[in-house]
Every structure is written in structure tokens, then in C-alpha cells.
Amino acid sequence: MRNSKMKIWVSFFIIKKDFYCIRIKCHEKSKIDSSFRFASFRMTKCFYICLMNVINLLKNILLKSQIYVSLCATLLGVFILQEQESYQNTLAFILFLTFWNGYFFTVYHKRKFAKIWNILGFVLISSILLKYFDLNFYLKWLIVLILGFIYNADFLNINLRQFSLVKTFYVGFIWALTLVWFPLKEMNWAWFFIIFFYTSAITFPFEIRDLKRDDFTTLPMKIGIQNTKYLSYIFLCLSSVLTIYFLKFEFAFSLFLTFTFASILIYFSHQKRADWYYSFLMESLSLMPFLILVLLK
């Protein structure tokens, strides 16, 4: 009887010991799992911070430096030159430098480094044009440069941005001159008005965005936000009609898809949209025809 009691106590002690061992092991495993989860969380957080830093860096390099908008405008020019069978690498490079210099001046013209950059850009572009093209081509470029220059020449008391109706259509006019009249040997009026209507249409949403920022009267202030959007749709329709009648099929199709996407972005544009909506998505509308054309080919 006594031996049986002793066996029971020994068995109980062994079971209790095993139970504590299991609890200790579970506790240690739980600590390991918690440490792993904490390490994973920290790694995820570090990855997110690094990703955001890279995005902000790219934003500063591409968007704030005006490289992205200049690249988009240049590829729209390449699209036109390919349709007209007039493409040259040197000409595409000139278009990029011209747009980059122009936008850089518009945004940063009050800063000293921008003036130095613009002077260097002028010298570089002039050298390339005089070396590879004739004098007539260079004179056309100078006219475009002067017209773009007076758009925002505050130090000469010339600022067309303060005249709402002039400003609204002047951007489209300058783009049409730069992309059609300047690079093509012969004036193509169909392309001129396609670019004029299209670039004007996708410029109007920027005025909607800047409605509370501008200290002068703009088109949305005069006719209202909704009517400004309607005007954009009308301009896109006019551009579409010209595209269908005068351009080759694959180029017309690329532009038609771009106009459709532009209509969607214009419809959803308003003052409270994030900055990337305008500085990235809206600016990318100039890039889209070229990208669609590449995909079609």
C-alpha cells in the first residue's frame, strides 16, 4: 500500500515537472514569436521610410526640377515629328532643352541660379542650332523663346499670367508654336490647332486647382468651375475631329484614347485634389500619345 502511494506521488511529480517544462518552452516560444513580430514590424517600418524617401527624392528630381513636364512635352513633339516623318534625334534634344529652360524660367526666374542656368541653356541650344540647322530655323526658335519669355517676365513689368483670358489660351498657343511651327519645315495647320485645343483643354484644370492661390482673375473665376470643364470638353472634341480627318490611323487612335483619358481626369479635377494628381497624372497626358503608339507598334 505504501509503495503504491509512493508510485502515485512519483508519477504526479513527473507529470507536474513535464507540465512546467512545457509551460517554460511555450513561454520561450512566445517570446521568440514576439521578438520576431517586433523585428518584422521594424523592418517593414524602415522599408516604408526608405521607400518614401526614394519617392520624395524622385519627386524633387523629376517634378520640381521640371524635367518630367519637359520630357512629356518633348515626347508629344516626337509623336508629331514621327507622324510627319520628320523625326531627328538632335531636334528632339533641342525640344527637350527648350521646354526645360522655359519651364525652369517660369517657376524659378526670381532666383539667381535659375538665371545662370537659363543663360547656359541659351548658349547650348544656340550652339547646337547654328551647327546642325540653318539660320531660318534658329530665328524661328528665337521667336518662340521671346514669346515664351514674356509670359512671365516680372522684372520687365511684363506678365501675361495676370491677364486671365490671354493666359488661358497663351499656353496652348506657345505649345503649338514650339511643337509644330518651330520643328516642321512647312506649317501644318491641322497639327497646330490639334495641339492648341488639346493643350488648352488640359491646362484649364490647373486653373481650377489654383483658384484660391491666384491673386488675379482667372477663367474659372469668370465663368465658374463647371463651365471651365465644359470648355475643356469642347476643345477636346474639336481636337478629336481634326485628328480623325487629318492624321494617320495609328496616330489618330493614340490621340483618341488620350483624349478619352483626359476627359476622365478633367471630370474628377477640383481644388482639393492632391498635388500629384496635377503634377503627375495631368502632366502625363502629354506623354500618353507616344506611349500608346509604342504599344500599338
Image (cartoon, helix red, strand yellow):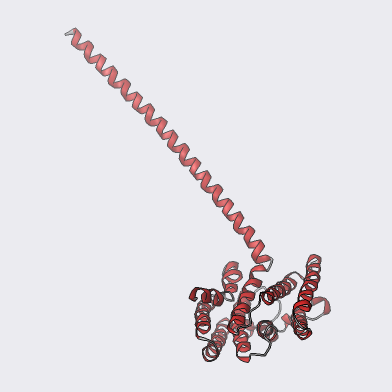
Percent coordinates x, y for residue 181 in the rendering: 68, 86
Circle count: 0
Question: Is 17 in front, or is 85?
Answer: 85
Question: Where is the N terminus found, in terms of image quarters?
Answer: top left
Q: In the figure, is residue 124 to the left or right of 61?
A: right
On the image, which quarter does residue 121 sit in? bottom right
Which residue is farthest right?
156
Percent coordinates x, y for residue 81 in the rendering: 62, 81
Residue 228 visible? The answer is yes
Q: In the figure, is residue 281 to the left or right of 108?
A: left
Is residue 112 placed above or below 44 in the rendered structure? below
On the image, which quarter does residue 17 sit in? top left
Which residue is farthest left?
1
Percent coordinates x, y for residue 20 in the rendering: 34, 24
Residue 272 visible? The answer is no
Which residue is farthest front?
132
Percent coordinates x, y for residue 243 in the rendering: 54, 88
Is residue 170 placed above or below 14 in the rendered structure? below
Residue name at image x 74 percent, y 82 percent = 144
On the image, which quarter does residue 54 sit in? bottom right
